[in-house]
Image (tube, helix red, strand yellow):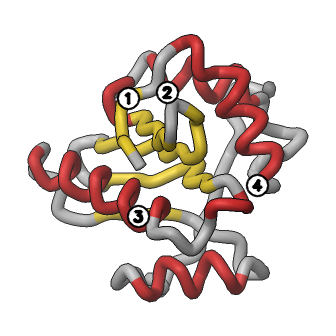
Amino acid sequence: MHIRAFLASDEAAVIALWNECGLLRPWNDPHKDIVRKLSEQPEMFLIGECGGELVASLMAGFDGHRGWLNYLAVAPALRHRSFGRLLVAEAERMLTERGCPKLNLQVRSSNAAVLAFYAKLGYAPDDVVSMGKRLIPD
């Protein structure tokens, strides 16, 4: 798998991948999420390609205090080939270069497979409650 930054021409394929992976939610417009990401650290919107085909994605970012990972997706037919691990490692490398001391991510508590994936990569639950507030409705 080759890792590169997102290109505008990737949008439809990325949204299709997110849909195939069950990442889309009615309260998050994926087009708006992409536009928002491209306004902040667009080089950290990573795409994985195999044979010229988009097969994986990951959004990463650093706010000066913590790093975040969002929208990790690997085409279901291509899972268990280390594509997700490679994308996370590249994001961790980029964040470390920026001086990021800690990386956070959120996983739905019912998603046992993804929780196990991140545990294998050294991630562990933090003793926190995730809270959110919508500022701009999609």
State the SS at label 2: helix
Q: Earlier in the sequence, mark 4 or mark 2?
A: 4
Q: How far apart are marks 4 and 1 (CA)?
A: 20 Å
Residue that appears at 51% across and 31% down: 52
Q: What element carries label 3?
A: strand
User: Which quadrant of the structure image shows residue 115?
Assistant: bottom right
Q: Is residue 137 left or right of residue 47?
A: right
Tag shown at residue 37: 2
Q: Residue 5: which disc?
A: 1
Q: Farthest top residue?
A: 8
Amino acid type shown at disc 3: Asn
The crowding category of the residue bearing disc 3, from other C-alpha atoms within 10 Å (few below 14, some 14 to 19, many at least 20), is some
Q: Tell me the element at label 1.
A: strand
Seen at 36% across and 41% down, the residue is: 3
Say which label, 1 or 3, has the lower sequence index.
Answer: 1
CA separation in Å, label 4 and label 3: 21 Å
- Is 60 above or below relative to 38? below
Mark 1: which amino acid? Answer: Ala
Residue 137 location (% of width, % of height): 79, 27
Give the foreground label among 4 and 3.
4
Q: In this view, does 47 lie to the left or right of 20?
A: left
Check if mark 1's residue and mark 3's residue have beta carbons within 8 Å: no
Mark sitting earlier along the chain (4/1): 1
| Three-letter code for the amino acid on which mark 4 is drawn | Cys
Q: What element carries label 4?
A: loop
- Mark 4 is surrounded, within 10 Å at the Cα level, by few (under 14), some (14 to 19) or many (20 or more) other residues, namely some
Q: What label sits on residue 104 in the rendered view?
A: 3
Q: Label 1 near label 2: C-beta < 8 Å?
A: no
Q: Which of 13 and 95 is in front in this view?
A: 13
Q: Which comes before the other along the chain, label 3 or label 2?
A: 2
- Count of numbered marks: 4
